[in-house]
Image (cartoon, rainbow, N blue to C red):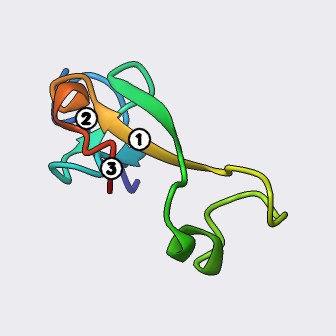
């Protein structure tokens, strides 16, 4: 049987995501999803934001609990 990856933080659950800051495999319990306002035009071109010229749009990042304080808000 093929086993999935194990979470790099708790070493108990199956990893579902990767931290967008440090790249470690994390499970749903150890992950935090952050929604940031898309303030640059490239976010619209890459398809990260909602359609519309006048809306702010959002960019979602999934990070581990240790990297929450290190997320670059103005990226």
User: What residue is shown at x 68% (from left), y 51% (from top)?
Assistant: 57
Gap between marks 1 and 3, in whole Å? 16 Å
- 68 above or below 29? below
Indicate which disc, 1 or 3, sits on the residue closer to the N terminus. Answer: 1
Is 1 or 16 nearer to us in this picture? 16
Indicate which disc, 2 or 1, sits on the residue closer to the N terminus. Answer: 2
Gap between marks 2 and 1, in whole Å? 14 Å
> What crowding class fits label 2: few (fewer than 14 Cα within 10 Å), some (14-19), or many (20 or more)?
many
Gap between marks 3 and 2, in whole Å? 28 Å
> What crowding class fits label 1: few (fewer than 14 Cα within 10 Å), some (14-19), or many (20 or more)?
some
**Disc marking residue 62:** 1
For mark 2, give the secondary structure.
loop
Question: Residue pushed farthest bottom?
Answer: 45
- Residue 68: x and y in percent read 25, 27
- Which residue position holds label 3? 74
Question: Residue pushed farthest right?
Answer: 52
Quadrant occupied by the C terminus:
bottom left
- Which residue position holds label 2? 7
Indicate which disc, 3 or 2, sits on the residue closer to the N terminus. Answer: 2
For mark 3, give the secondary structure.
loop
For mark 1, give the secondary structure.
strand
The image quadrant of residue 65 is top left
- Residue 63: x and y in percent read 32, 37
Is 59 or 55 nearer to us in this picture? 55
Quadrant occupied by the N terminus:
bottom left
> What crowding class fits label 3: few (fewer than 14 Cα within 10 Å), some (14-19), or many (20 or more)?
few
Marks 1/3 in contact by CB < 8 Å: the verdict is: no
């Amino acid at each position: 049987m093929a086993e999935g990856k194990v979470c790099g933080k708790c070493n108990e659950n199956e990893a579902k995501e990767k931290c967008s800051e440090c790249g470690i495999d994390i499970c749903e319990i150890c992950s935090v999803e952050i929604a940031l306002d898309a303030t640059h035009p490239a976010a619209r071109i890459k398809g990260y934001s909602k359609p519309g010229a006048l809306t702010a749009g959002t960019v979602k990042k999934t990070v581990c609990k240790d990297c929450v304080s290190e997320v670059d808000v103005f990226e």
